[in-house]
Image (tube, helix red, strand yellow):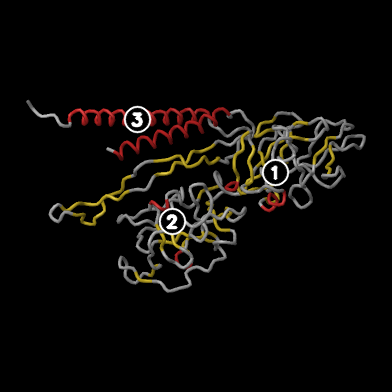
Amino acid sequence: MIRALTTAASGMVAMERQQQALANNLANAETPGFKAVMSELLAFPEQRLALWDYDSGGPTGSQIGRITTGVAFQEGVPLWTPGTLQTTGRTLDVAIRDSTPAGPYAVVWNGGMGAATTLFPGPVQTTAAQPGVQSPALAAPVPPAPVNPSPGAVQTVAGQVVAGPNGVLEVAGRPLAVLNADGQPLAGVFAARNPAYQGQALAGGDGRPLYDNHGQPSYRWVDAAGNVVGQPGDDAWLGAGLRVGNADDMGWHSFFAVDYAAQPGAGSGGPAWVLTRDGHFALDANNILVDAAGRPVLPIGPSGLPIPGGRIRINPAYQGKDLFQPDGLPVVDSAGNPSYSVIDANGNPVAGRLGVVDADVTQLNPLGAGEFALAGATTAAQALALLRPGSGSVQPGSLEQSNVDASATMTQMLAALAQYEANQRVLRTEDTLLGDAVEQVGKVNA
């Protein structure tokens, strides 16, 4: 009964959070460049079910299944599927045409703590479950290691997840990062193939382990010495997991870079730059190109990266119609006037253009108003280290529409409401049963 109450209560909270995310998607169905957020739910530790031998008074050891004990709203993950490009004819509108390659992706260590660690330097032991198969020495489960918060510690790479040397799960020769419930990497922790696992696939589409017919998970948590420190489902490792996906929710995508710190009231300690897909630009009082939130759009320099402190200033003497060429360079009118100039932080003309940069979307945090912050980047130098020259292209005179499917979102909202009400009915039923039990205690037949 207690399990039913806690499961229903956690389900109601999760459905409420999911409903909020869906409502925000629906409210931004007309916002240019907006990316719908997909709700990720986290199941509480599962309990294994086993046959019970009443003669001996204990379990037989034969697994008959698993049962969950509740669910929680873990995070909202933006879906990066491109929206429809719509021609507006407005000279200050610019759309991004993305070119992220399709295929599987995963979050791996990007050097430092994890990839640079020598894995399994010591001896290994033979498992009893599968004689002759070597596995790391089993250690008592311990809580996760401290989080390594340094920007760029992990990154997304394309490729299939495979079992590398010593069974460590990797992509392109780099071990997968183990993330906590907040999406931060756990230092010195790795996922290694479970030698007792008899399946083929190593991880599900959501990064969770797969289970064979004997209830064995496809991978376990190990330290750099190869000691098993836990496995998915352990209480101490609640929320820990891998992140795998595809170009719809991972990978390097193209954005406009915006100088967030330049706006009055931005405050200290916040992001230096932010990224946006909303190309519905405008001009401030000084003819500086700004985004929909009024923040200066950063020009792209010869290196393909943003110019710190740079600005795109529209030329008031320009008499042409279009402001940007298909490559983002200025247009020159019949009198030889360029449509805009690029200036540095001191107001001096420099080489540059309107363009895009690529960012690993797993390292972005939504800010609202269609803007995303680079995780942990509070200075321009830190932001530069997390960006790449843009692989996408710009399309002047157009806007990328929101990728929210209004009809599907409404259906999902109704489904979330139905699940909320179902959990609510469970609570009412259990409340009634508890009340009846209290009333009947101590009663005897007259």
- Calculate the distance from the C-alpha at mark 3 to the C-alpha at mark 1: 44 Å
Give residue 267's position: percent from left, percent from top. Answer: 69, 39
**Mark 2 vs mark 3: which is more N-terminal?**
2
View extreme (right): residue: 335
Assign a secondary structure to mark 3.
Answer: helix
- Circle 3 residues within 10 Å: few <14, some 14–19, many ≥20: some
Type of the residue with mark 2: Pro
Per the model, the C-alpha gap separating discs 1 and 2 is: 35 Å
Left or right for 15, reference 88 = left
Front position among marks 2 and 3: 2
Residue where numbered disc 3 is placed:
422
Q: Residues within 10 Å of mark 1 (few under 14, many from 20)?
A: many
Residue 242, image x and y in percent?
48, 52
State which tag comes first along the sequence, 1 or 2.
2
Which residue is more in the foreground, 365 or 244?
A: 365
Q: Taking 53 as reference, is 305 left or right? A: right
User: Would you name the residue on which mark 1 appears?
Assistant: 273
Residue carrying label 2 = 143
Outermost residue toward the front in this view? 442
Which of these two is toward me, 256 or 186? 186
